[in-house]
């Protein structure tokens, strides 16, 4: 009888912990998100370098909560995309993009902060700066929900 009480107690404790953690059991191992996030960043680089803003924007969460902070604050995936299309309305303005000095720091199982440097090489100039991104794990994969670039 003591074994049954112990077993029921352990099962109840496991169910309570499960409920506190979102209500689902997963047998999948926790995977380091670094590879997936770097793949998104590399895909964005390739997209911008071929002049494809829409493919570049695939790295961002398609959400009204997505935010870009530069000289102004832009909220919403569509508005962020529109901002990029106005700012980089030609291949010459896009230039060649390079990201470097990438540092990833997990904040939770679903959120990772990425910092790094960006550089555009164009015929007339070479703007560069730093960025901070917050990636959030979504059903479609890791996507940027916050981008602060200067």
Image (spheres, rainbow, N blue to C red):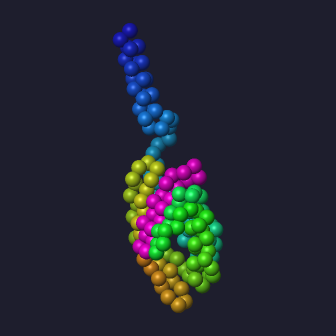
**Is residue 12 visible to us here?**
yes
- Compared to residue 118, the image places residue 75 above or below, namely above
For image coordinates 47% across by 78% down, the residue present is 119
Query: Which x, y percent locates residue 138?
Result: 54, 51
Residue 76's place in the image compared with 49, above or below, is above
Q: Residue at x 59, y 67 (%)?
A: 79
Q: Residue at 62% x, 79% y: name it.
A: 89
Answer with left or right where residue 132 lies relative to residue 66.
Answer: left
Q: Is residue 140 left or right of residue 25?
A: right
- Residue 100, image x, y percentages: 43, 72
Q: Quadrant of the C terminus?
A: bottom left
Please state the horizontal and vertical placement of residue 23, each as a whole percent of the image: 49, 35
Q: Indicate whether residue 142 is drawn in magenta.
A: yes
Q: Is residue 72 magenta?
A: no
Q: Nearer the viewer, residue 80 or 125?
A: 80
Q: How many labels were placed on the picture?
A: 0
Taking the view exactly as shown, the residue that stands out farthest to the top is 1
Point out the residue furthest to the bottom here. Answer: 124
Residue 44, quarter of the rendered image: bottom right
Our reading of the magenta stretch's main secondary structure is: strand
Q: Which residues are magenta?
A: 130-150
List x then y, in percent, for residue 117. Answer: 42, 73
Quadrant occupied by the N terminus:
top left
Q: Residue at x 39, y 64 (%)?
A: 103
Residue 60 visible to an observer of this rendering: no
């Amino acid at each position: 009888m003591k074994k049954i009480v112990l077993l029921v107690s352990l099962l109840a404790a496991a169910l309570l912990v499960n409920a506190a953690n979102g209500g689902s059991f997963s047998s999948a191992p926790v995977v380091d998100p670094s590879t997936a996030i770097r793949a998104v960043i590399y895909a964005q680089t390739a997209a911008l370098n071929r002049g494809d803003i829409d493919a570049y924007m695939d790295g961002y969460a398609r959400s009204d909560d997505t935010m870009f902070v530069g000289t102004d604050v832009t909220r919403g995936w569509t508005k962020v995309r529109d901002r990029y299309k106005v700012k980089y309305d030609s291949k010459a303005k896009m230039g060649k993009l390079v990201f470097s000095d990438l540092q990833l720091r997990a904040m939770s199982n679903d959120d990772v902060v990425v910092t790094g440097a960006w550089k555009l090489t164009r015929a007339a100039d070479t703007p560069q700066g730093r960025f901070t991104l917050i990636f959030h794990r979504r059903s479609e994969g890791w996507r940027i929900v916050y981008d602060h670039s200067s």
